[in-house]
Image (cartoon, helix red, strand yellow):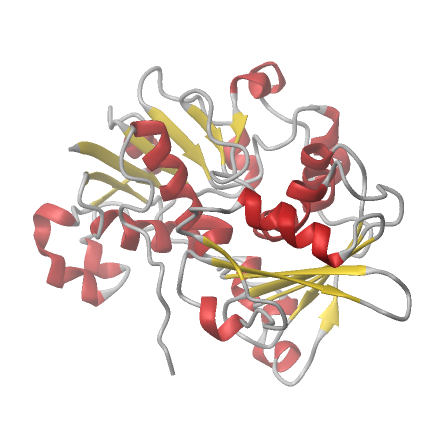
Amino acid sequence: MAFAAIVGASGYSGQETLDRVLAHPELDLFALGSDTLAGQSASALDPRLARNGSRRAPAFVSNEEALTSGADIVFVCLEHERAADIEAPARGVVIDLSGAHRLREPAAYAEWYGFDHARPDELGDWSYAIPELLPPAGRLVANPGCYATAALLALLPLARAIDTAGVVVDAKSGVSGAGRSLQASSHAGFVLENVSAYKVGRHQHEPEIEQALGFPVCFVPHLLPVRRGLIATCYVRGADADHARCLLESAYTGSACVDVLPEGVTPELSRVQGTDAAEVAVFGDRATGTTVIICAIDNLGKGAAGQAVQNANLALGFRETAGLRLHGVPV
């Protein structure tokens, strides 16, 4: 049994992480951090948490108290700039769900995130980890972004086989991907009955994808009028659909979280929503010779909290799928 702390538990990714920690057979929730809810019971976030009993869901403390609680595993679920400023505990595993430690080059933070990194000399101490492809190395782990996760699950196994020029990633996500903070683009009047592209050519996950692949891609994100779920459609040349399928099936053989779908079956948000699983499919476009790889995930599951817990399991030596949600509602 390992003691766990969550820093920033009142946001979407924090609450999703909390739910998985409470269901985890090897984790005991030790500290629950939120500056806005400090001193209140866990049920202040969600009254259903009272059902788990006070032992499993302790009262909220400040984020600093949770960070320095001495827990064996700390999940950091803060905004990017705030997470960049934290001093990682001297012991235990730390999983950062923000973008604060994903990029190796300090100058990239000013360009893509809009702030100068507070601890640039420490970026090299963090390992960027996608469990199936880039397992965590060391105790400080940078959890990938949601769009980057879907794009890399689709493309990283093919990186050495495709033409690296002209790769396109067209991705669409539910509104929860923007976080719980209020903003005009997340208002119901803007989101409902609407689909919009945003941050075209300047989304912060673009350099993250390039860093992992070793080459740039044209990445265009869109906002869908749904609460959760993300689908990325990737267009490549240089490897036909059969070759791409072989590479993907080889990469994910035995994976409990990533399914390469049978030929002709397309990924769907409804099957991955609320889960920590991913669906990947491959198609060939006869008219242009383009190979199309599609990946669907839940942006809060495999794209955030689920992947964080999966990384924690590997870092702590637990069963990889402990605490994960791997099956949706079959309706």
| Above or below: residue 284 compared with residue 323 | below
Q: Is residue 321 visible?
A: yes
Residue 318: image location, x then y, percent? 27, 34
In this rendering, the count of numbered labels is: 0
Relative placement, left or right, of 86 versus 244 is: left
Residue 94: image location, x then y, percent? 39, 29
Q: Residue at x 29, y 51 (%)?
A: 20
Q: Residue at x 47, y 22 (%)?
A: 137
| Above or below: residue 159 compared with residue 220 | above
Q: Is residue 169 visible?
A: no
Relative placement, left or right, of 201 versus 20 is: right
Q: Residue at x 46, y 71 (%)?
A: 271
Location of residue 33 by image quarter: top left
Residue 216: image location, x then y, percent? 81, 40
Relative placement, left or right, of 154 versus 77 is: right
Quarter in which the N terminus is drawn: top left
| Above or below: residue 268 compared with residue 63 | below
Near-viewer residue (173 or 158)? 158
Residue 319: image location, x then y, percent? 28, 39
Quarter in which the C terminus is drawn: bottom left
Q: Residue at x 43, y 57 (%)?
A: 12
